Image (cartoon, rainbow, N blue to C red):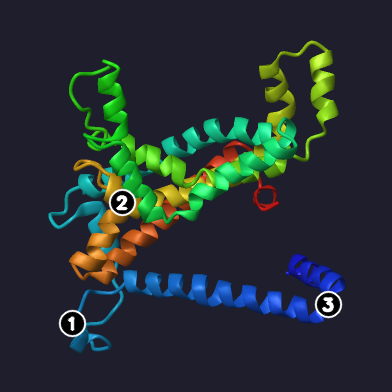
Amino acid sequence: MKALQNVFKEIAGKHGLGAASFVGIAVLFWVIFLIALPQVAMLDYSFRFNLPASEVGGPQDVYTLENYAYFFQGNDGTVNTLDIGILVRTLIAAVFVTCIDIMLCYPIAFILAHSATGVAARMMVIGLIVPFWVNEILRAFAFRVLFGSTGLINGIGMSMGLWDQPVDFIRADVALYSGLTYAYILLMVFPIFNAVEALDRNQIEAARDMGASWWRVHWRVVLPVAKPGIASGATMVFMLTAGALAAPQILGGPSSLWFTQLIYQWFNESANWQRGSAYAVILLLVCISFVMMLMRIFKVSIGEIGR
């Protein structure tokens, strides 16, 4: 609370009391009405029975753990390996996409921060941002066309003699992972860029002058500075990938059911909002727990991520 007061005073000192009040009210409205209350309502739904509208509020409308028990045991009382397996596969896929984004975005962010200057830097930023002017759904369909049996990738591969028959990239989930990796690339690039930009280039030159190889310079000098940015980007990419729905629906193969698709089915196809809410709460808690565990392992605090 004291930190918030200090931020309010800082904004008021720089931009006036009116601007500080507007920002404070806007943030408060956002947090309460668009984040907290919907989550509380969903949590309440998750502990309710799926009743007809005429029985809501009646004697049958009581709290229950049935929706959570179903995730673990199903209807027959045995372990619900299907839904648990889908959740595990979703988390593994989210980790994979996050790792790919880190490997792709770290060199881009470093070059943008310490190598590219002038026109080259501006062109790199434009090249990163402009494609994201296109709607996410359209980009997902573009990836489906690109990786389709008659798409550009298969066309080039067969014309070069790399393979004889079209490769089913959709069924192999190559299109899905590529689309998700691309969808959140900016959320990884700019946090790393923001962290690496603060690094004094003289430190890099000093390490090079002392005979350190490039990989050692990055491991001992750059990565410790970039760690908060990597953690921030990885958190956003992991959470958004695990919670993605459009890309798995469009690019996913027949055997790559995403956990969010299960939630969607409970809400829309089964009209069971209570069980859908329970599954959404489970996904949220598992993702938060996983992120907190990794933060503890890599010794990164929330304050460092929020910088």
> Mark 2 near mark 3, Cβ–Cβ under 8 Å?
no
Disc 2 residue type (three-letter):
Phe
Up the image or down, 244 lies above or below 266; here it is above
Nearer to us in this view, 1 or 113? 113
Q: Secondary structure at mark 2?
A: helix
User: Which of labels 1 and 3 is toward the front?
Assistant: 3
Instruction: State the CA–CA distance, disc 2 to disc 3.
Output: 46 Å
Query: Residue at label 1?
Result: 52
Left or right position of 138 against 293: left
Q: Earlier in the sequence, mark 1 or mark 2?
A: 1
Instruction: State the CA–CA distance, disc 1 to disc 3.
Output: 53 Å
Q: Residue at x 34, y 54 (%)?
A: 246
Residue 172 sits in quarter: top left
Residue 231 sits in quarter: top right
Work out which residue is located at the far top of the displayed protein and give it. Answer: 211
Left or right position of 255 against 191: left
Q: Residue at x 72, y 21 (%)?
A: 217
Nearer to us in this view, 258 or 123? 123
Left or right position of 180 against 60: right
User: Which of labels 1 and 2 is toward the front?
Assistant: 2
Query: Residue at label 3?
Result: 16
Nearer to us in this view, 178 or 283? 178
Residue 152 sits in quarter: top left
Q: Residue at x 64, y 45 (%)?
A: 191
Q: Earlier in the sequence, mark 2 or mark 3?
A: 3
Residue 219 is at least partly visible in this image: yes
For the N terminus, give its image quadrant: bottom right
Marking on residue 259: 2
